[in-house]
Image: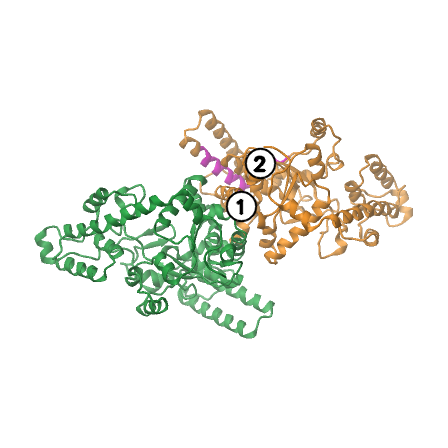
Chain colours: A orange, B green
Amino acid sequence: MADGESGPVTARELYNRVTSQGDRIRALKTEKAPKNDIDVAVKQLLALKVDYKNLTGQDYKPDSPPEHNVAMIQNCSPGADDGDDFVDPWTVQTGSAKGVDYDKLIVRFGSQKIEKELIDRIERVTGKKAHHFLRRGIFFSHRWLQDVFDVPLVVQMTDDEKYLWKDLTLEKAYQYTIENAKDIIACGFDVDKTFIFSDLEYMGSSSGFYKNVVRVQKHVTFNQVKGIFGFTDSDCIGKISFPAIQAAPSFSSSFPDIFNGRKDIQCLIPCAIDQDPYFRMTRDVAPRINYPKPALLHSTFFPALQGAQTKMSASDPNSSIFLTDTPKQINAKVNKHAFSGGKDTIEEHRKYGGNCEVDVCYMYLTFFLEDDEKLERVRQDYSSGALLTGELKKLLIETLQPLIAAHQESRKQVSDEVVKQFMTPRKLAFDF
Amino acid sequence: MADGESGPVTARELYNRVTSQGDRIRALKTEKAPKNDIDVAVKQLLALKVDYKNLTGQDYKPDSPPEHNVAMIQNCSPGADDGDDFVDPWTVQTGSAKGVDYDKLIVRFGSQKIEKELIDRIERVTGKKAHHFLRRGIFFSHRWLQDVFDVPLVVQMTDDEKYLWKDLTLEKAYQYTIENAKDIIACGFDVDKTFIFSDLEYMGSSSGFYKNVVRVQKHVTFNQVKGIFGFTDSDCIGKISFPAIQAAPSFSSSFPDIFNGRKDIQCLIPCAIDQDPYFRMTRDVAPRINYPKPALLHSTFFPALQGAQTKMSASDPNSSIFLTDTPKQINAKVNKHAFSGGKDTIEEHRKYGGNCEVDVCYMYLTFFLEDDEKLERVRQDYSSGALLTGELKKLLIETLQPLIAAHQESRKQVSDEVVKQFMTPRKLAFDF
């Protein structure tokens, strides 16, 4: 769960938060809000000012934004060995074969780890065993979430973002949306409980979406998006205003067909942690436009085949296993390209064992091998040297081949008609 | 007619134009455009660079925008007596009782005057005498334009802009749209040829509008809107991206119902000259997204009752004649508050005559007295002193009272049902 209030990223962001808190207090006074509300807001303001001074070493002064955009992480984890991770909504980079250091990211983004207590609570509430992604603290599974919580699921396809950031036409961006929607649907979502939408299409067919976009846009300044996303004066105005479009689906009134016009339905957003800046902003804005804040469930990143410090790329077929790969391709890719934590010779491997922390096959198995005990046995055997690299690779190949084949079979069943059903704004199987 | 190419406003705008022209040429080369196209673009680039040097005294250098944002007007019309006019889309100010100096504004905005040749041509093409607004070079009349050119008319109500700039709710902004729509409809537009839309509403019901908004947003940078509109880093991202929303209705594909999906229909925008910056930007973007440039017809401003250098304000009933005024109120307002160009005593007035250039009653008559000969007689008689201020006021009162009463009567006939008809996206009485 992310908490936008508790962990600001940078001095500039904190500066903006002090400024807007001041504005909020003035607004409360103008509208003669209850004294208690104002007192609470003033206390928050004072706390923010203390944070600001701690971070920058200077008092907050109106109209003097911090010159150096110090990031919280530099305060929390000083040292040279942690400076290699870079994570924002468009770039994820790490210099470490173990992948991004999530503990540091959690501090930097002001999130909280999914601890055992939370998982226990989820299992109590749902009466179902937590999904292995959740148990292993690596990921979430939308489908599991929909099944056990029995809630409407709304999937936003940001094809406008793709158009704004990449060198492609609007038509091409929308085409990708349809192709991606097919892969999502093939995961087995319930059409009666799921609405998938393209920004480009839904903006023009929803009576609620654009109105919420404008509401958010009124309450976020260029200074703020500059602080959060690093936009510059040379960026196009589409990028600059886009965060509001990613924010608006957090509010139930953006979907009048599903939520019957209600604006008080809480929203949970499962997303990769690099998307957090959007929702930290959303959580800041929500109370100012009288909407509940969305909650967040962050996933880790899926590592690239050639090592967690390399990049997956659609144009490099060897950088990952694709959903379109044949069994033969899977076999070849894993054997040839999967970065191994094993030793150079069998003798050495038997003697010293392999390193699961950097072995991509093992990382992939934590995603795809559901059996906790079997996974633990693999970890022990590979670490001790009892399991050889070739055997580990074989195990991953045999796990992936049927999974991918089944996905391809499901995807074949997803006709254009089915995509259209999922993407039509409509009432779902819930009453609000 | 405005011409965005021929008269840039400021050094910064010109700088941006050189930069984007360079980008355009690179794009043309990449897509292997015909040599002739590239040659033309290069010639334009060189001309822009010469303009830039003339204006700033410096050579254009990439990544070095001009430090001082010199405006063209300072070059074209040096002198102290012309520094008082300030015109942008949100503020119109003048220090002169004669009102804004339009000749200078035309130079500054790079527009052209509506000369006699153009009016003659319009009369030849339409076979109708030009409207007195057009003949007097002061204004346009949408209805006259629709009648004589027999074209679809689309009226954009920018309630999102109102919400973003003013301290009001979204609901209130939309309510103003409906009230304003009633006044527009009461002017007598043909429902079969007219579509009135609210941005807040139409964005959510058009399959073409948002797509064009995003197209424009991709091709305009913050630097550009900063140069054109003076936005700052403290402005909300809604304001920053709004110009694209004002631009998109210039393109026929924003109205698929009316233009049957065609994107090549030319657009004429009659608007007050303060709105020109939006469309100068639109004309710059249009060729880059393969749309025709809109043409513009600029109106002058309607002067405030207490003098052209004062401001009309909805909260000051004496600052203008309102469409809701009773005959008695019109009588009282004109007699008490209309700024007069007459002399202090009857004797002086008879001797020296009145000054039509600053007399608000005379200015109003140029708008509302259709008879050219009668108007000219009024001008001569008032200037010579033959017509007294009280008589001039009486003439204006007797002209306004029936006009306003007739408008109120028409407006009463405009039911909510009629408003809904005008505001429903639909095919109009034209085939495309």
| Of callouts 2 and 1, the N-terminal one | 1
Q: Which mark is residue B165?
A: none
Q: Give the range drawn in magenta.
A: A1-25
Amino acid type, label 2: Phe
Quarter of the rendering containing residue B165: top left
Please, what secondary structure does the residue beneath circle 1 have?
helix
Q: Residue A225 carries which label?
A: 1
Give the residue at x 17% y 53%.
B392
What residue does disc 2 label? A259
Q: Residues within 10 Å of mark 2 (few under 14, many from 20)?
A: many
Quadrant where the image shows the N terminus of chain B? bottom left
Where is residue B88 shown, x and y percent of the image?
37, 53
Up the image or down, B220 lies above or below A380; here it is: below
Residue B347 as seen in the image, left or right of residue A356: left
Please, what secondary structure does the residue beneath circle 2 have?
helix
Q: Main secondary structure of the magenta part?
A: helix
| Nearest the eye: B191 or B261 | B191
Where is residue B306 shown, x and y percent of the image?
24, 48
Label 2 – label 1 distance at C-alpha:
29 Å
Where is residue B420 shown, x and y percent of the image?
44, 45
Where is residue A73 shown, x and y percent of the image?
62, 40
Amino acid type, label 1: Val
